[in-house]
Amino acid sequence: MSTGRPVALVGGASTVWGVRAATWSELVQEAGARLFAAVPGLAAADVDSLFVGAAEPERFAFQSHVAPLAAELLGLAPHRIVQRTELACASGQSAIRSAYAAIAAGLSEVAVVLGVEKMNLPSMAEANTSMACVMDRPWDGAHGATAPPFFAMVAQRHMLEYGTTPEQLAGVSVKNHRFANSNPDAQFYEKKFSREKLLGLPLVAPPLRLGDCSSMTDGAAAVVLVAGEKARQYTDTPAWVRGSGQHASWHNLANSGSLTDWVGMRSAAREALGSAGITAQQLDFAELHDCFTISELIEYEMLGLCPRGQGGRYLEEGQTEIGGDVVVNPRGGLLGCGHPLGATGVAQAVEVYRQFTHSVPPARQVPDPEWALVHNLSGSANVHSMMVYQRGS
Amino acid sequence: MSTGRPVALVGGASTVWGVRAATWSELVQEAGARLFAAVPGLAAADVDSLFVGAAEPERFAFQSHVAPLAAELLGLAPHRIVQRTELACASGQSAIRSAYAAIAAGLSEVAVVLGVEKMNLPSMAEANTSMACVMDRPWDGAHGATAPPFFAMVAQRHMLEYGTTPEQLAGVSVKNHRFANSNPDAQFYEKKFSREKLLGLPLVAPPLRLGDCSSMTDGAAAVVLVAGEKARQYTDTPAWVRGSGQHASWHNLANSGSLTDWVGMRSAAREALGSAGITAQQLDFAELHDCFTISELIEYEMLGLCPRGQGGRYLEEGQTEIGGDVVVNPRGGLLGCGHPLGATGVAQAVEVYRQFTHSVPPARQVPDPEWALVHNLSGSANVHSMMVYQRGS
């Protein structure tokens, strides 16, 4: 954990996510307007740094050098630090970690973190090319190993090793879509998905069906992180950053080991929970990276919430519902909210703040939460990034 | 300046830069091999973080999610922190600042920073599209305002306001190409450029001729930054990070102010030099961002080395040659070395370490240097990033 000074998350906001008739720039402006509305004490002149999480604006939005452009669109320019971080699907989390490091090191006092991705284009052929870039492209991406086929292999293997069923996979999607029904920012806000309906949707990459996969989504989200001594200027309920962990293992698929044992996640969790001084069992809720249904089941196991191979059973027992051991993805997850790559990690942090301040609808409010974990993975589940937050009072 | 612990740069290396018959991945591997050769005490297992500066690998190299891939190619995986930063032409500097913040905050002990760009493609039409992305694309880039036309406007204006001449512009190129003649890593290592020859080269965007513009270059560079208490394990002569500054002003050209008064550079310099506790006059040398000849002249002025408008005269007086006030770009600059976007800031830091350790050829060795500044700009000269280093003994 950091040897630097304490850092707190003091508020945030999200745009509506979905297939949006909005440009990249318009999404940024919408996130900015919502952020300033959500954090009334925030003055643009107080913000001394902006960290942008964005995975592929160069391909999806034909725009690079996005950090200073975003600063201008947010009404924040001029200021001291701008930076964009890219870590594929974990780009937003990476931007939050950068802001955290800058504040802990004393380089910034008040940082805005923006996550944004505009993914839906007139031609989705371009989008497919873009997604192939996320893998080791000449070795894996060029041969079709984009995310759905990769996670389909993971699911096949988990079924073979542990007897996990399509019904258990669908169960993750049912839960997260149900939570998303109380989140007006979610792509699938008003869409109902029963297990039966999900099991009848088209196969994308067997055994994964359409409802097992998160979506191509347009959206943005933003949060404010500040030096600890400034936290009370912005909120009565700071979300303190108490732990942080990351682990990167092999990128090329030929080098990776077990498909179902995500070493990187176990390491990142050990570091993040260890630095916070808590166990996974002490978490009140967790925002996990359910890019596919199988991901969430394996994440239960890697986090140590249940034994290896028992993710499906743990889900069926209701342990990740409100009232269970640890509520997972009350926001609605990537499955229910959509997955605008760079925005996801930031929106998960927004949910932490909203849960801590009891400002979400009752259907998804975790009872009296004190500890929360946010997790993102990227690529072939080879990179895992986490942060642990504690509610201040 | 940071409230965190001290950070030192303890070594680095560069690949040969130029139009290379090497892929993006091969450039990374070459930089890695040279880094481990240059820092004999560096063990892969000691490196706990990798920060990659890369501007547009998604477009130039069809590869995103580059940080974990680079970790694997460098022989560093698995490890704790990977992150790529993008800040267009200042991406390398931004990666160094991220590593610095992470170490100062206690999140990392030994960080490798890699800068890399593969820019030369079979079709340079793709490259033009990519460069247009760096500006506010729909407003500026799409109408032709890429870097050469923008800096041509800057040069025209500086000529109008201050009487700067084409001969003074060429003088910058003569100096930096001469320095590059003692740098075997440089794209123009063995190429001779007299003022007369430069003034006869084709116009790119009047008044800028081919020799006034830095090149599209393939190349990579890497440095090692460590927590202060570990510095002596790697070197007898650490380069201590003493100051850091950044400033981002308006991105959209319609919002920017004077073409010749770079407010952002003056602010960044005030912060970087102020936090180091020195004046510009105390610098022994500076690696400035001479993406175009006019840039270096204005940078003399913004750094406070000479009065406004006197950059050309200051150059002609030889004040930025060895033996002058402050040696500028002894490495050979972007003009002499080429400009692989994400690699430039990292290679400039390599030069700082080499100068401090007296390990460059006599033709470019600054006599007994103690203080050095590295500067990068990005976009329409709207973002400026700097670091100040002091030689340890």
Image: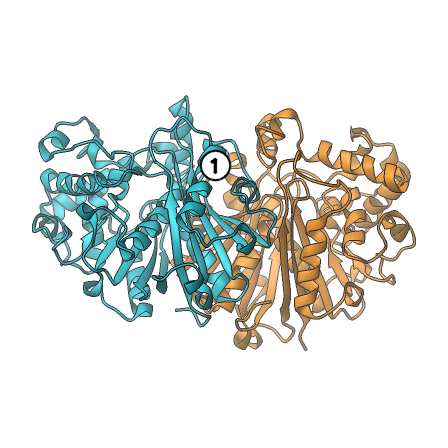
Chain colours: A orange, B cyan
Residue B150 or B244: which is nearer the viewer?
B244
| Residue situated furthest front in the rendering | B40
Binning the other alpha carbons within 10 Å of mark 1 as few (below 14), some (14 to 19) or many (20 upward) gives: many
For image coordinates 51% across by 37% down, the residue present is: A61
Q: Left or right of B141: which side holds B167? A: left
Q: Is residue B159 visible?
A: yes
Residue under the image location 30 percent in, 62 percent down? B267
Residue drawn at x 87%, y 32% is A200
Query: In this orientation, does residue A48 appear?
Result: no
Comparing B236 with A389, the one in front is B236
Question: Where residue B204 sits in the image (x, y, percent)?
Answer: 23, 29
| Tag count | 1
Mark 1 chain: B
Residue A160 image point, x, y percent:
87, 36
Give the residue type at disc 1.
Pro
Q: Nearer the viewer, residue B37 or B217?
A: B37
Q: Is residue B54 left or right of residue A149?
A: left
Q: Secondary structure at mark 1?
A: helix
Q: Is residue B74 above or below residue A51?
A: above
Residue on which disc 1 sits: B57
Indicate left or right for A303 with B386 as reference. right
Q: Where is residue A217? Give x, y as percent.
A: 65, 40
Q: Quadrant of the rendered structure where residue A130 is?
A: top right
